[in-house]
Every structure is written in structure tokens, then in C-alpha cells.
Image (cartoon, helix red, strand yellow):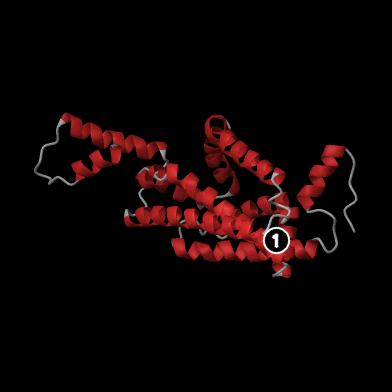
Amino acid sequence: MVYEEYQAVISLTDEVELSERQNQSLENWDFYLQQQLAAPEQIAMEMEIRKQGYLENFTFSAEINIFFQTVNFLVNSFWDAAAMMLLGMAFMKWNIFDASRDLNFYIRMMIFGFGVGLTVNSWEMVIYVSNGFEPFWSAAARPTYDVGRLGMAIGYIGTVMLMCKLEVLSRIRHALACVGQMALTNYLAQSIICNIIFLGFGFGMFGQMQRAEIYYVVFGVWIFQLVFSVLWLRSYRYGPAEWLWRSLTYKKAQLLKL
């Protein structure tokens, strides 16, 4: 509604005198952009800060992160994560994750998941791209986004379980298992790597790459972590972050070397 009213106003010629309601529509759109941190002045400010050092970036991100880790966490993120965890627990109880179900079950799971996920996500992508990546369309796609990502998750689970059941692509399965075993280390490492690539205290690539070019970074990080995880676990029992976490939990340094 806000977006449609805004589009109707800006489509008018300059000669048209705007009514009070039309001016209010422009103000509503500006307020919406401010909430999404997508107003032109906000984008310009962020572009400038991201070129600066660690302290400036930390200070800028702190206010945003405080909101996401308090208000947004209680209203949205907690329930989102809890729902996925409960679904995972249900899948475990139904013996889906141990590849013990019959072959046709995992084939149907893969086809259904990707059928729903790819259809929904492709529709969202077409809308988002064709409308110039307007932040409004990202928000408008949220109800179907959850359907799409759940479908994709089910499709990926079916695919991996199918690979395990057929005992194919053993090296890829081993590499994925190693990444999972070092999940905390890899999660933290992705943040560190991307901070170095994009922010001012590193290579300063923030806002310098086209959307398609960012996939080079994605694939590069994936490949690095797949290889690193396999090599690390040849000599050590846990990832570095996992070792630290376990040592703090048991209040005693855990054996790291194999």
C-alpha cells in the first residue's frame, strides 16, 4: 500500500500540485526507507563508514546489532530458530537423518522440496530483480520466503540423505561432514573473512562489486572452508572455536591433537 501510493505520486508530472494526502504518501515512504536503513542519506553514510577502520565499523554496527539481538530476537528470530530446531528434532525422531528410510522416500523428499523451493524462490527473484531491488519488494516477499527456504531445506536434506544411502560422492560427503564438525569455527571464520574482504581495515570492497560478482566470494569461501576443515581434522579432534568452547564448558583444557 505504501509503495503503490508512493509510485502513484512520483508518476505525476512536475506541474501537478500535490495534495496533503499525496505529500503524506511521500513522507510515509521516506519513513519506511529509514526503518529499512535504505534511505539515500543512510546508504551514503554507511558507504563512507564501511571504508574506515575497525572501531568506526564496530560503533556503527553496534546500534543495529543491539536491536537485532534484543527486540528483533524476541519478536522474530527466537521463534524462527526454535521452529527450525523443532523441525530438525522431528526429522531426527522420524529417522530421516540416518539414511534408514527407503530410497523412494528420499527421492520424493528431494523432488517435493526443490519443487516448492525453486518455484517460490524463482518467483521472488523475478519480482525483486524486475523492480530494481526495491527494499519494499524484499519485505513483501517475506511470507513466501519462509515457504521457499523450508522447501529448499527439505530438498537439500533429501539430496544429502540420498547421497549417503547410495554411498556416492564419498569425498564430498566427507568434506561436508568436516565442515559440520567445525560449524562454529566456520561460522565465525566467514564473518572474519568477509570483514577483511569488504571493510576499510581490509581490502575495502564494500559496495564495489556487482551482485553477480559477490558469488565469486561465496564460492571462494565455500571451497576454502571445505578444504581447510578436511585438512585441520586430519591432525586435530575439534575446530579451534569448538575446542575453546569445550574447554570453557568443562573448565579444563581439552585434548586437541589426535
Q: Quadrant of the N terminus?
A: top left
| 249 horizontally vs 173: left or right | right
| 141 horizontally vs 181: left or right | left
* Location of residue 34 (image quadrant): top left
Nearer-the-camera pick, 220 or 156: 156
Residue 47 horizontal/vertical position (percent): 45, 50
Give the amino acid at mark 1: Leu
At horizontal 42% and vertical 57% (from top left) the residue drawn is 122
Q: Quadrant of the C terminus?
A: bottom right
At horizontal 76% and vertical 49% (from top left) the residue drawn is 241
Q: To which residue does mark 1 refer?
A: 176
Classify 223 as above or below 126.
below
Nearer-the-camera pick, 111 or 80: 111
Residue 104 horizontal/vertical position (percent): 62, 60
Residue 184 horizontal/vertical position (percent): 71, 49
Nearer-the-camera pick, 82 or 2: 82
